[in-house]
Image: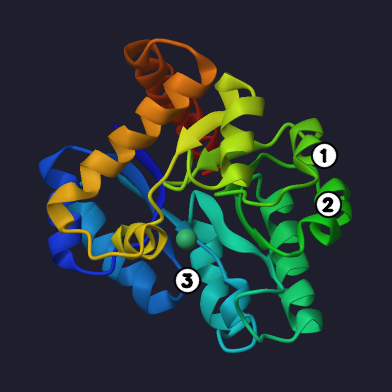
Amino acid sequence: MHDAHLHISDIAFFKEMQKHQIEGIANAASPQEYHFLKELQAQYPKLRISAGIHPWQADTIAWEAMLPILQEAVILGEIGLDAVWCKTPMEKQKEVFEKQLQLGQQLHKPILLHLKGMEKEALPLLRKYPNTYLVHWYSCDDYLEDYMALDCWFTIGPSVGDDPAVTKVARKISLQHMLIESDGIDAIRWCEQKEVPLAAYRTYLTRSITRIAALRQIAEASLAAQLMDNYHHFLNKCELSV
Ligand SMILES: [Zn+2]
């Protein structure tokens, strides 16, 4: 089982991940969070770390403080543009996003994208900096074909089967470019609009696989094997960069 994008809010959640031997990429949005995750990774090497200045913090995280971490991380992210869930000035978001796209390309590091309400505007920037892009929980009704044309990978979020846009992604993209993600236990709770116990974490990843297998009309076991292969293939791309 893998979880290609998550946030580790507390140790209990990390223990749950470790208990089920779930491999995953945890996100660091600040130097503090990166050092915290490095400590966890020392205990559990199946944990990988993505690091990037999130659009929500584009005006609060100092570039100089984050730069050595961006240079060290195997994957940059989550980075992107968000016109819906934050008030960060868009000019600042664009500036920080483009600097990170530039760096990712220079250092040959894959990039994990957070896009909300700016899916159209992000496209010319991605075309300017060709790279391996992993689009996290894509939930826009439009432009999916444009991202597919850029050969993007996608992580399918836990709202697959409930959210029509997310379901469309799961139906349409190449099975070779598909990964699954929880975005962390808090995101599962947000998406389910209820308290979800930590013990149910693994169940939600399994539920996504079950739902995607039904959408694609393939056997669940073969999808699960394919997704795990995809995850390892994607990690290989990341690790080639260091
Ligand atoms: Zn996230």
- Label 2 – label 1 distance at C-alpha: 8 Å
Q: Nearer the viewer, mark 3 or mark 2?
A: 2
Q: Which residue is mark 2?
A: 123
Look at the numbered discs 2 and 1 and tell me whether their residues touch, using CB distance below 8 Å: yes
Query: Which part of the image, by quadrant, shows the N terminus?
Result: top left
User: What residue is shown at x 41% (from left), y 59% (from top)?
Assistant: 191
- Amino acid on which disc 1 is placed: Asp
Which is more N-terminal, label 1 or label 3?
3
Res 214 quadrant in image: top left
Res 202 quadrant in image: top left
User: What residue is shown at x 48% (from left), y 30% (from top)?
Assistant: 236
- Residue 180 in the image: state x and y as whole percent: 44, 38
Q: Which residue is mark 3?
A: 29
Q: At numbered mark 2, what does the secondary structure look like: helix, strand or loop? A: helix
Q: Which residue is mark 1?
A: 146
Q: How many marks?
A: 3
